[in-house]
Image (cartoon, helix red, strand yellow):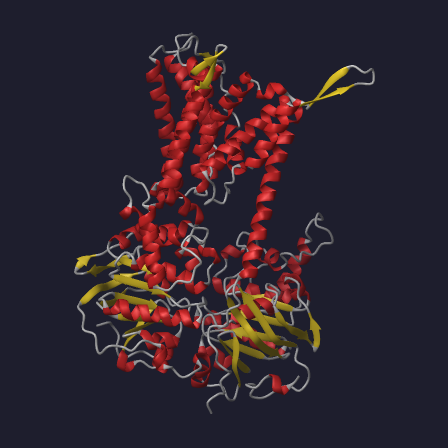
Amino acid sequence: MFAALVVACVVLGISNPDFVGQSNVVNTLRQISMLGIFSLGSAFVIITGGIDLSVGSMIGLTGVIIAKVSSHESGGLGHSLAFGIAVALGVALLIGLVQGLLITRLKLQPFIVTLGGMLLIRGVSQTVVEGATLSLGRSPLLRLANGGLGSIHGDPLIPYPVLMFLAAIAIATYLLHFSVFGRYVYAIGGNRDAAEYSGIDVRKVETLTYVISAGLAGVAGITYAAYIGQMSQQVGVAYELYAIAAVVLGGCSLRGGEGTVLGIVIGSAMMRVIDNGINMFQIPYEDRDGIPRLWRLNPNWTFIIVGAVILLAVVLDQVVHLVQAARRLRAAPPSRAPVEAPPTRVPQ
Amino acid sequence: MVPAAEPARADSPKARAPLLSMRGIEKRFPGVLALSGVSLDVHAGEVLALMGENGAGKSTLMKVLGGVLEPDAGEIAIDGAPVVFDGVRSARRHGIALIHQELMLAPNLDIASNMFLGNERKRTLLQPIAREEMNRRSAALLERIGLALPPTTLVSALTTGQQQLVEVAKALSVESRVIVMDEPTSSLAAAESEQLFAIVRQLRADGIGIVYISHRMEEVLTLADRVSVMRDGRNAGELSRAEASYEKIVALMVGRELSGSYFPAKSAEKSGTVLLEVNDLLVPGAPSGVSFSARRGEILGFAGLVGSGRTELMETLFGVAPARAGGMLLEGEPFAPRRPRDAIARGVYLVPEDRKRHGLVLPMSVAENASLPSIAERARFGLVDRSGDNRLAEQEVSRLRIKTPSIQQQVITLSGGNQQKIVIGKWLAMNPKVLILDEPTRGIDVGAKAEIYRHMAELASQGIAILMVSSDMEEVIGMSDRVIVMHERRLKGVLTRAELTQERIASLMTGQLEAGATAAS
């Protein structure tokens, strides 16, 4: 997948120099980061073999709460921004905890619980904004998305969302690849029963993955609020599906037990590069009158291309798995039956 | 038929070509040779009982016959003509019907729909199902087997016995010539069993060949025309109705003389103090409580048939399914695990019967699996102590002589014996007090078996109490200091070393005999 990403970037860079232009690179990095933050959260859940469909709604709700609580524009309550963010993140973590407890304590299916959560949370956002939009006005929050470290021609060199993504990567890497908690996450995804039989507190670990997913969705929600500047009920719709796509492109299996942070980062990047590339890709040609023109991809093809890439990735992944399994079977030592004993005569 | 091909064959009841003939069937799974040159004949109008211990290969053979598994070698002939089954449907077309031990009915559909499932009376997939015809035919079949129920009754409303009869009717609906019944009475009440036997006899009179798999000696002796016994994936021998007796069947099932050298020598009578005391413990689903105790340094064997409740009892001891009543004392302190964590915290560990399902995280490495239960003990600030984990894994690999290219090898690639040793190893690293081994050597080659026995003896000598569930009679007798025999989820008797004989155990576990000893010491 990493090779595919590099190839895609090189091809796009050649076809349209603007793709590697400074403003497009910064913008794409920001997009990758915002997607990557909540994809990492989804990955925790997916590696345990669960699924979280409420991510997109959670992103929307976080932004809506921040706007409602801290905005000084009409409809806002005018509290401080810090208070707004605290309330929003608190609500996100709480919802994650409730979903996690429902799934682990009542043994409900994650798909159904988070589907319910997705609709319910979306409905709350809708009720709060009353079908309109809530503007953040000139809130200092907007600098979070548009500002950053360093500056070139007025644009930030490293936008804050990229820094937040790097922090999320560091934390996720620690948790998944170096901590006991992470080992448990993989063990549960690899074999839930064996994990339980090994004394792992499966319910606690699983619940925590939903809290982490909700929390990172909340963090991503803050960046989206800052990026968009005004919240409507539509923000974040279907983002959980982008997260799942990024996670799967990054090498996680929906069966659980597989995947790496690096893979998820690459998967997120792939999703955004495809998205951006569809707008950027162009082939210069001359029409019949000899006038130079540019052939571009039809933006309506976006979903076709994204869908095809995802399908191709999982098909390739499965083929690799099947080949490995076949090789393993062939390599299995031809051991004998347990005991060598000739058929015994019946004692007469 | 070539008589030389079947040395153990006692006699040949029919002269003409058998209805069904399986010759030299071989089936290999990764790491195990499940069937090795197995032959079987079924004649029209006879009941052939197929017997053998768990893991002898009966089910695998029947799966080959039913087209579920493809044999690696050997041939199947019907009426003397060779056939090849490429799937369940093709076996069904040749008149082979399998009735599985776990009934394969859809409880949400009615009797008629179940009977014709996959065989609906219609020409194309989209045509409406011909309900009337199906109902009519179902009603006729139900009448034939003596089940007075309308064909529109939902299967979920039937008793297990009635469902079993529906399965028989279903087999008849496709004009089966050979019907395989796998432990059909294992969940039936006595009256229901009688009804089933009457139907089996009627089918025999109708010229159908019946393969009857059962552990219940009594049934087999009254019902079967011939008894074929399997052992270790081979034909162990065959008995005609006249020859068949309880003792002869057991002798064939168990096979060879017990070889003393195979098992580690036992020290003299052990007199450790009581470590685990189980008082009237009511396992979920069991009819009554069980009581026994295990001493330090003792290997306590648990014998019984499949479904006798041994695994369930062990799971309750380990906290998987908490007890409904009764109590336990571990080192004199109350012990009531509600989850495996609770048991593990007290030093009670389980090596489960199904290691792939409950014992190992297959995609993970040897080191990751071996260190999994104890990983938190070595961690600092939640950080995995990789070198500590690796040291632990190396230690267990060398202690148990686990054959693996490295400790980073995925366990899915290792053989069954080595996988089992990893499950044992992860607990040995945590100083067990009570080690529960459920079928510790199932599907494991002979060398690994001997090593596991050696380790068990060594652990016992260190004062650990070992509870060993085993369906391998030789193993139970060779390893145990005392044996608890279970039958239909009840504790049937406790045998001390002096009382241990195959016959005693076998008659207790088939429910033939009440033991003199009732409760544990």
Tell which of A286 and B521 is nearer to you.
Answer: A286
Residue B225 pos. (x, y %): 55, 82
Q: Quadrant of the C terminus of chain B?
A: bottom left
Snapshot quadrant of residue B88: bottom right
Residue A68's place in the image compared with A259, above or below, is: above
Residue found at x 58% / y 55%: B152
Q: At x 27% / y 56%, what residue is drawn?
A: B430
Viewer can see residue A53 = yes
| A49 relative position to B27: left or right | left
The image quadrant of residue B416 is: bottom left
Q: Is residue B46 positioned above or below B132 on the image?
A: below
Seen from the viewer's position, the closer of residues A82 and B274 is A82
Is residue A87 left or right of A123 when viewed as pictured?
left
Tell me where residue A95 appears, x and y as whole percent: 38, 30
Horizontal side, residue B229 vs residue B346: left or right: right
Q: Residue at x 37, y 63 (%)?
A: B311
Q: Is residue B512 visible?
A: no
Q: Which image quarter is the N terminus of chain B in?
A: bottom right
- Does residue B167 sit above or below A19 in this rendering? below
